[in-house]
């Protein structure tokens, strides 16, 4: 996914943050809970990156007469970030602040810094859905305005989740509980969320790591990622995945 219209996504500043996130999203799932929280967070941040990039790219390239499905995907991409931050602020940040006061203040301040433009972006997509039409230039301008601070935050937040730092205040068991609570706080319709994650992160990032499709994220049994995700859950919202990062069921376009 490249071209003149993608210059914001291809800027050196943005790509610096993306590479920082990818460095934390290792091919192997860490054995210790103290390392798994940051690892899972990095992969979720790549879901955001890839889905935003795909929605931006297809803003003027979705199939003719398919604007509503495109807008539903664009809304899902933007809402995923908002819901991700809601989950952090309800489950993760308070748990860490209990023993490390002030440790999440920078993360929360960054959330607040782009909350209004993120809300504006979601509002614009909902308005476009209601009107049945999209001005791609307006949509892209709203994404351009917010992309750098979002990617900066997604990269810098991982520093506050370093396992060695957390182990100074928490046990592995406590961190495992926090990880599970954070995961539980952001869950939705499996028919939508599992294909969304698989198609916007798992396959494209596995390709970059020279791994086969289906590994390593999300950390679920193989049949979930090879059967339920691409077959059972895929079909309910299949019209949305035409504009995802990997938009073919078997032959994937690794457009980076």
Image (cartoon, rainbow, N blue to C red):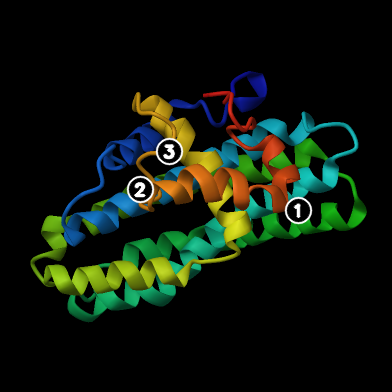
Please tell me which residue is depicted at 76% across the width and 53% down the height of the picture.
125
**Dot 3 crowding, Cα within 10 Å, few <14, some 14–19, many 20+:** some
Please tell me which residue is depicted at 48% across the width and 42% down the height of the picture.
226
- In the image, residue 195 lies at what x, y percent? 57, 48
Q: Nearer the viewer, residue 1 or 196?
A: 196
- Left or right: where 117 falls relative to 106: right
Marks 2 and 1, the one that precedes in the sequence: 2
Residues at marks 3 and 1, CA–CA distance in whole angstroms: 31 Å
The residue that mark 3 highlights is 214
Q: Nearer the viewer, residue 144 or 162?
A: 162
Please tell me which residue is depicted at 62% across the width and 35% down the height of the picture.
54
- Left or right: where 132 falls relative to 79: right
**Dot 1 crowding, Cα within 10 Å, few <14, some 14–19, many 20+:** many
- Left or right: where 179 falls relative to 124: left
Determine which of the numbered discs, if any, sits on residue 53 in the image: none
**Dot 2 crowding, Cα within 10 Å, few <14, some 14–19, many 20+:** many
As helix, strand or loop, the secondary structure at mark 2 comes to helix
Marks 2 and 3, the one that precedes in the sequence: 2
As helix, strand or loop, the secondary structure at mark 1 comes to helix
- In the image, residue 213 lies at what x, y percent? 44, 32
């Amino acid at each position: 996914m490249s071209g003149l219209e993608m210059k914001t996504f291809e800027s050196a500043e943005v790509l610096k943050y993306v590479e920082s996130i990818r460095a934390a999203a290792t091919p192997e799932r860490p054995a210790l809970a103290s390392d798994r929280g940051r690892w899972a967070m990095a992969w979720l941040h790549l879901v955001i990156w890839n889905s935003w990039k795909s929605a931006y790219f297809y803003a003027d390239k979705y199939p003719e007469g398919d604007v509503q499905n495109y807008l539903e995907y664009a809304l899902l991409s933007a809402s995923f970030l908002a819901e991700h931050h809601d989950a952090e602020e309800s489950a993760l940040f308070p748990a860490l602040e209990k023993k490390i006061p002030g440790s999440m203040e920078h993360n929360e301040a960054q959330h607040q810094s782009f909350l209004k433009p993120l809300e504006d972006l979601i509002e614009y997509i909902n308005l476009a859905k209601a009107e049945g039409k999209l001005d791609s230039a307006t949509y892209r301008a709203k994404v351009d305005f917010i992309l750098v601070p979002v990617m900066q935050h997604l990269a810098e937040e991982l520093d506050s989740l370093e396992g060695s730092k957390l182990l100074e205040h928490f046990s592995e068991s406590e961190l495992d509980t926090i990880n599970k609570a954070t995961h539980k706080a952001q869950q939705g319709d499996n028919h939508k969320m599992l294909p969304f994650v698989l198609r916007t992160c798992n396959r494209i990032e596995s390709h970059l790591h020279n791994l086969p499709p289906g590994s390593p994220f999300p950390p679920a049994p193989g049949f979930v990622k090879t059967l339920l995700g691409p077959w059972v859950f895929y079909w309910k919202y299949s019209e949305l995945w035409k504009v995802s990062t990997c938009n073919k069921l078997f032959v994937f376009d690794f457009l980076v």
